Image (tube, rainbow, N blue to C red):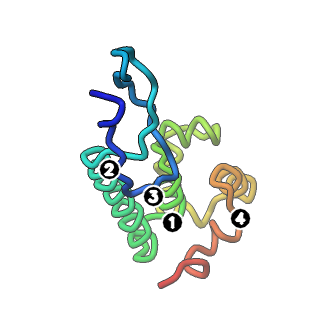
Amino acid sequence: MKKDNVPQDEGFLGGKTRDVCYALDENGNYVQVLSVGWEPKNAALEQALNLVNEQIEDAREKVLKGQASPIFYFMEKNLMDLKILSQYTGISKWKIKRHFKPAKFIKLKDNVYKKYADTFNISVDELTNFTKHQKL
């Protein structure tokens, strides 16, 4: 691809990021050219972000319906999985799974709430009073 043909299709991120592409200059040498986007890549990124947002909303609804604890929601919102959350908190994966259950969650000790809140960069109040802080 020639330098002048590098795609500049501003997309989902609104030109906030740029990719380095390699293209041929007038002399036939490869040079670095910045691109604000490329339509197929923009479409794939938008699709992926929409899927992530759907998963976060599903987790939020489960918490509001009493089917999961706020830990589950904040894990999804922070794009974590059990392994990553376990590594950040120092809590084993099987214990975290138990903490996903609302009945177990309400019985946690303050220091455990604090570990989760610190990991998610929220206050303990936001974690323990989820419905109060969520827009319905």
Disc 4 designates what residue?
124
Location of residue 109 (image quadrant) = bottom right
Disc 3 designates what residue?
14
Amino acid bearing label 2: Asn
Instruction: Kindly report which numbered mark, 1 or 2, lies closer to the viewer in this rendering.
Output: 2
Amino acid bearing label 4: Val
Amino acid bearing label 3: Gly
Does label 2 or label 4 sit earlier along the sequence? 2
Instruction: Kindly report which numbered mark, 4 or 1, lies closer to the viewer in this rendering.
Output: 4
Circle 3 crowding by C-alpha within 10 Å: few under 14, some 14–19, many from 20? few
User: SS of the residue at dot 2?
Assistant: helix
x and y, in percent, of residue 69 in the image: 50, 64
x and y, in percent, of residue 29 in the image: 38, 14
Disc 1 designates what residue?
103
How far apart are labels 4 and 1 at the CA level? Answer: 18 Å
Disc 2 designates what residue?
42
Location of residue 5 (image quadrant) = top left
How far apart are labels 1 and 2 at the CA level? Answer: 42 Å
x and y, in percent, of residue 39 in the image: 27, 49
User: In this picture, is 66 found above or below 35?
Assistant: below
Q: Are marks 1 and 2 in contact (CB under 8 Å)?
A: no
Q: Are marks 3 and 2 in contact (CB under 8 Å)?
A: no
